[in-house]
Image (cartoon, rainbow, N blue to C red):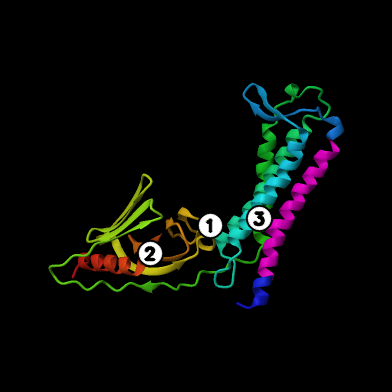
Amino acid sequence: MTSGTARNIHRRMILVGGVLPTVVALAAAIVMFSWLPELPEVIATHWGPSGPDGFGSPWFAILMPVGLTLAYAMFVLVLSWRLRDGALLANQKLVLTSIAFISGLLSVGITGTVYVQRGLEDATLAPDAGWWMLVGAGAGLAFGAIAWFLLPAAGAVTDDGIEAPPLQLRADEIAVWSQRVRGLWRVTAGPAGLSVKGLGVRKFLPAESIESVRVVQVSPVPEFGGWGYRVSLDGRFGLVLRAGEAIEVKYAGGKRFVVTVDDAATGASVLSAAAAARRPA
């Protein structure tokens, strides 16, 4: 990847993920500002089953789309800034298009809720405006789809995984390897297979179902769209809590499970030995 290529991609990210969504939100703010003389001093900001049940200054509605869009855009751009293999990956594009969705949802939805209150003397008489949020969601989806095509084409992840050699054991030996991840999860590899436990969730892959074990390098946002128990657009899923080395297990007809963990090479070797021992001779 050349520095020029990276600059071009980053410029497109700023334009599509930052500038355009903010312009849409600013346009909505200008429209709502122009309605100020026609609005009550306090407007409805929330509706319940029996009508308006939350109220606030019109300025709250005017500034909300801009403020939230700007804050979310900066957050997502920082998370997505690092390129993988010289390109935006599909998950990065998906995260970036969520900025456009948020901008469309808030700009159209909130502007609609303010529009229905023009000419009212009492905000408690405001008609139901919930359907405007549905219109906003539709606008957000359309804006997000446009943003997807304005961003550079999604690149492919370079396969830099290393096949884990089985740990060499004597006939009377067994090996068990275990690591804690962020103090909340425990990852264990042993004769039975791979176990991941934590926060009320358990994932177990029996050794006999494992086809291969590799050590891979993981970038959370580009490859998985963030951190946590994630699914990537290329079909992998797993526990992704940091960038760096991870164990990737291929099992049960090509499914792939990934877990980021320290000392992944040792754990992968132990798991590879357990899988080899369960395979028919």
Q: Residues within 10 Å of mark 1 (few under 14, many from 20)?
A: many
Tag on residue 225?
1
Instruction: State the SS at label 3.
Output: helix
Quadrant location, the C terminus? bottom left
Residue 47 falls left or right of residue 38: left
Q: Which mark is residue 12?
A: none
Give the foreground label among 3 and 1.
Answer: 3
Residue 139 image offset from top left, x and y in percent = 69, 46
What x and y, as percent, mark residue 186?
A: 33, 54
Mark 3: amino acid: Met
Residue 213 x %, y %: 33, 67
Q: Earlier in the sequence, mark 2 or mark 1?
A: 1
Q: Which mark is residue 262?
A: 2
Disc 2 vs disc 1: which is toward the camera? 2
Instruction: Give x and y (percent) for residue 204.
Output: 31, 54
Asked if residue 15 lies left or right of residue 121, the reply is left
Q: Amino acid at mark 2?
A: Asp
Q: Amino acid at mark 1?
A: Gly
Q: Quadrant of residue 240?
A: bottom left
**52 inside magenta stretch:** no
Q: Secondary structure at mark 1?
A: loop
Reading the image, the residue beneath label 3 is: 74
Residue 50 visible in the snapshot: yes
Q: Is residue 163 above or below residue 135?
A: below
Instruction: Estimate how packed mark 2 is, as few (under 14), some (14 to 19) or many (20 or more) residues with alpha carbons within 10 Å.
Output: some
From which residue to which does the magenta span run? 8-35
Which comes before the other along the chain, label 3 or label 1?
Answer: 3
